[in-house]
Amino acid sequence: MVTLGVAFFALGAVVASFIGVLVARLNTGQSFLTGRSHCDVCNATLDSCALVPIISYAVSGGRAQCCGAHISIMSPVTEAILGGLFVLSYLMLGLSAELPLMLLSISALLALVMYDLVHQILPPSLLWIFVALSAVTGFLGSISVTDFYNTLLVAFVIAMSLAAMHFFSRGRAMGLADAPLAFGLALLVGPAAFPGFIFSFWIGAVVGIAILLKRPKGSRMGVEVPFAPFLAAGFLLSYFTQWNPFIFVEVFH
C-alpha cells in the first residue's frame, strides 16, 4: 500500500506539472501538447532536470537555473496538493473503476482553480469537461440510480442558489460560472455536497477576513477574490473527511 501511495503521489505531481503548462498556454494560441517548456523570464529552453516536480524547485532553491529568476511557489505547492489528493482518492476508493475517473475529475478541477486564480475566469471548455467527468464519476459511485437522481437534485439546488446570488447581486457576489462548477462538485462528492457547500462559505469567510485584516489602515479599496478555490476546497474537504456540520443540529435536537 505504501508503494502504491508513493506512486500515486508521484503521478499526481507529474499531472499537476502538466496542468501548469496547460493553464499557462490555454487560449494563447500555443499548444500544450507539443513544444519544449521554457523560462518565463529569459525564454531559455528548460532541460529535463529543471522539470522534475517539487524536487527541481527544492534543489534549485526556487530559482531558475538559466537566469536565476525566482520561480513561483505555486508550482511545487499545486504539485504537492494534487499528489496528496491522488493518494487520498486511492485510499478512499481503492483500485476500483471509479478511481481513474475521480483522478481525472480532480485534475480538471485543479486546472479550473489555477486558471481562475490567474485570470479570474473559468474557461467553458475545461468547465464542461469537469462537469461531464464528475457526472460519470458520481454515477459510478452511487449506490443506485435513485441515489444518483437525489444527488442530481441536490446539485441542481446548489447551482441555482449560486446563480441566484449572481443575478441578485448583479455579478458582484460571484461569477455565473461558479454555478456549473458547484453543480459538478456536488455530483462528484455525492452525499457530501451540502456539507461541502457550507464549508466553501466558511473557508471563504476566513480567507476574506484575513485579507481585510492585512489591508493598510484606512484603505477602502475592494479586493476581488475568485470563489472557485473556496468551492473546490470546501467540497473536497467534506468528501475526504466525511465531516458533516449538520450533525450538531441533530445532537441539539
Image: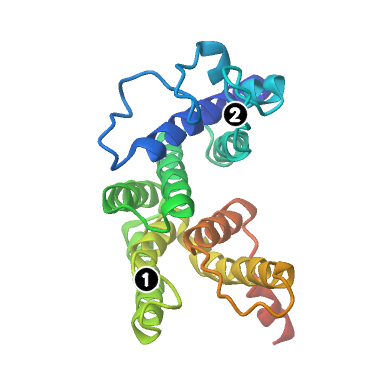
Q: Which of 71 and 92 is in front in this view?
A: 71
For mark 2, give the secondary structure.
Answer: helix
Q: Residue 159 carries which label?
A: 1
Residue 205: which quarter of the image?
bottom right
At a point 58% along the width and 42% down the height, the residue shown is: 92
Q: How far is mark 1 from mark 2, CA to CA?
A: 32 Å
Q: Between disc 1 and disc 2, whose residue precedes?
A: 2
Residue beneath disc 2: 9
**Where is the C terminus found, in terms of image quarters?**
bottom right
Q: Where is residue 106 in the image (x, y as percent from the top left)?
A: 46, 44
Q: Which colour scheme is used?
A: rainbow
The amino acid type, in three-letter code, at marker 1 is: Ala
Question: Which class describes the residues within 10 Å of circle 1: few (<14), some (14-19), or many (20+)?
Answer: many
Q: Where is residue 233 in the image (x, y as percent from the top left)?
A: 57, 56
Q: In this view, does 211 lie to the left or right of 98?
A: right
Q: Position of residue 201 (x, y in %)?
A: 57, 71
Q: In this view, does 241 lie to the left or right of 108?
A: right
Q: In this view, does 78 lie to the left or right of 115?
A: right
At a point 51% along the width and 26% down the height, the residue shown is: 14
Give above or below for 38 relative to 121. above
Q: Where is residue 20 in the image (x, y as percent from the top left)?
A: 46, 35
For mark 1, give the secondary structure.
Answer: helix
Give above or below for 41 relative to 66. below
**Where is the N terminus found, in terms of image quarters?**
top right
At a point 59% along the width and 29% down the height, the residue shown is: 9
The amino acid type, in three-letter code, at marker 2 is: Phe
Q: Which of 205 and 34 is in front in this view?
A: 34
Q: Nearer the viewer, residue 125 or 240?
A: 125
Question: Which class describes the residues within 10 Å of circle 2: few (<14), some (14-19), or many (20+)?
Answer: many
Callout 1–callout 2 Cβ contact below 8 Å:
no
